[in-house]
């Protein structure tokens, strides 16, 4: 998420720079009217007051931009929180993304992170979900609560903790705010349950998703104001399902069966010298067993094929492990797009690890647009670098776990 936060911060900075430029232009054109002497005659207090008035005028004249600056600043603060909090103001989030024209990939990644956090934090899913009506709370005339104090509570995203704090110093003010909250709170139960439903579906094996599931996704994306991404997401899920099924079919056609026919006993079959020579010859075409080096860049299918040959002659496990360590280390240095498509089934099978699933989700959305391969060279390089970072992160998590490769290789012997 760090890259997304930086991207949002860049948009926020641009909007603030535009606002500042408009304020300067307004002062020069409408207030001073090229009379710089007038400005010099003002006292410091008068200058500050004049500038504040001009800033307010520009914000009023450009209300939409001012509103988005406020929303975007608060949302970035939310993303930077050390601990996740429930976020259900999807309507405002959609407004932000539309105004700054945030790219689809970033939108989806942010949305998935929010949905995941919302579902995780919804410990009482059968109970209704309420959120504070900030405007109603801030516009109310309190007797004991200072509005600047309450504004700080909201800006620091600790309203819930504020209500639960029985030791809060300004107890009468806290009780006053709590009473107003109960009178004006907003029912966001539908949005919370939509988050839960979406997270449930997207955490399932995508190969098992049905047309009914796709329609449920569309319905719940509409509930959280992201209908503009609903059909795109469904299209992507269908594409990934087809890819996964195609890979499963192709896996059955990999390699060759190099076994000798043997009796059905528990002892290992005797390997004839002729077969040993043949298998070592086949391995030697692609891999130098003596020095544990590849003779050419290997695809994942070729690695699994070599592994199946090794199993076919009962090669020692320590040799096999050394082979896998060397080839897989080299493999993950290859083209990230190739690694993703070749290793997709492996990554999916290991996606019960939430960290792996998070990185996999990001790659899938980065590559969801076919136009990526027809874009400018700079954009292509940028996306390739991002995919490469995600692949590296997955590789670091997987480490020396070669269960997938071993299982696939042994299946070729059946």
Image (tube, rainbow, N blue to C red):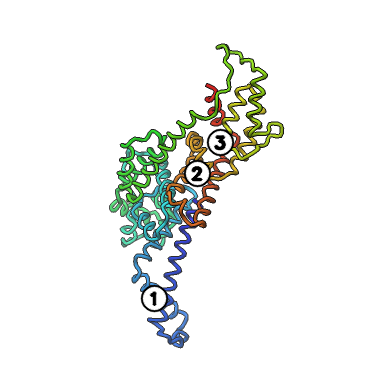
Disc 3 to disc 1, C-alpha distance: 64 Å
Query: Left or right of 172: which side holds 397?
Result: right
Q: Is residue 238 above or below residue 41?
A: above
Query: Can I make out residue 351 in this image?
Result: no
3 and 1 marks in contact (CB < 8 Å): no
Percent position of residue 43, x then y? 46, 83
The tag on residue 359 is: 2
Q: Which callout, 1 or 2, points to the residue nearer the camera?
A: 2
Disc 2 secondary structure class: helix
Disc 1 packing (10 Å; few <14; some 14–19; many ≥20): many
Disc 3 to disc 2, C-alpha distance: 20 Å
The mark nearer the N terminus, 3 or 2, is 3
Disc 2 packing (10 Å; few <14; some 14–19; many ≥20): many
Disc 1 to disc 2, C-alpha distance: 46 Å
Identify the residue under disc 1: 54
**In this orientation, which residue lies closer to the viewer: 19 or 47?**
19
**In this orientation, which residue lies closer to the viewer: 273 or 81?**
273
Q: Which callout, 3 or 2, points to the residue nearer the camera?
A: 3
The mark nearer the N terminus, 1 or 2, is 1
Q: Is residue 41 above or below residue 318?
A: below
1 and 2 marks in contact (CB < 8 Å): no
The tag on residue 300 is: 3
**In this orientation, which residue lies closer to the viewer: 153 or 303?**
303
Disc 3 packing (10 Å; few <14; some 14–19; many ≥20): some
């Amino acid at each position: 998420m760090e890259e997304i936060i930086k991207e949002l911060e860049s948009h926020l900075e641009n909007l603030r720079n535009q606002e500042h430029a408009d304020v300067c232009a307004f002062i020069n054109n409408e207030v001073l009217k090229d009379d710089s002497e007038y400005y010099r005659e003002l006292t410091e207090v008068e200058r500050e007051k004049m500038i504040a008035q001009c800033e307010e005028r520009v914000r009023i004249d450009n209300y939409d931009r001012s509103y988005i600056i406020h929303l975007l600043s608060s949302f970035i603060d939310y993303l930077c929180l050390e601990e996740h909090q429930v976020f259900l103001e999807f309507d405002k989030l959609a407004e932000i993304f539309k105004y700054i024209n945030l790219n689809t990939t970033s939108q989806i990644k942010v949305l998935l992170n929010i949905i995941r956090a919302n579902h995780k934090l919804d410990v009482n899913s059968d109970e209704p979900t309420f959120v504070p009506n900030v405007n109603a709370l801030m516009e109310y005339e309190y007797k004991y609560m200072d509005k600047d104090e309450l504004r700080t509570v909201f800006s620091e995203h600790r309203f819930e903790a504020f209500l639960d704090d029985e030791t809060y110093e300004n107890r009468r003010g806290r009780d006053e705010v709590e009473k107003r909250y109960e009178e004006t709170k907003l029912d966001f139960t539908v949005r919370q349950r939509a988050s839960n439903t979406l997270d449930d579906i997207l955490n399932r094996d995508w190969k098992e998703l049905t047309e009914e599931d796709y329609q449920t996704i569309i319905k719940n994306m509409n509930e959280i104001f992201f209908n503009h991404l609903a059909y795109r997401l469904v299209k992507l899920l269908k594409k990934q399902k087809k890819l996964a099924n195609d890979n499963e079919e192709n896996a059955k056609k990999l390699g060759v069966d190099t076994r000798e026919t043997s009796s059905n006993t528990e002892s290992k079959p005797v390997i004839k010298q002729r077969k040993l020579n043949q298998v070592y010859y086949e391995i030697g075409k692609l891999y130098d067993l003596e020095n544990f080096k590849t003779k050419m860049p290997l695809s994942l299918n070729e690695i699994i094929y070599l592994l199946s040959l090794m199993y076919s002659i009962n090669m020692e496990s320590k040799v096999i492990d050394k082979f896998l360590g060397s080839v897989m280390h080299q493999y993950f240095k290859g083209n990230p797009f190739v690694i993703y498509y070749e290793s997709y089934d492996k990554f999916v099978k290991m996606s019960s690890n939430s960290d792996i699933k998070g990185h996999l989700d990001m790659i899938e959305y980065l590559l969801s647009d076919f136009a990526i391969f027809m874009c400018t060279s700079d954009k292509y390089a940028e996306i390739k670098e991002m995919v490469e970072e995600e692949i590296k992160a997955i590789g670091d998590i997987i480490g020396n776990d070669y269960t997938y490769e071993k299982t696939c290789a042994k299946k070729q012997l059946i």
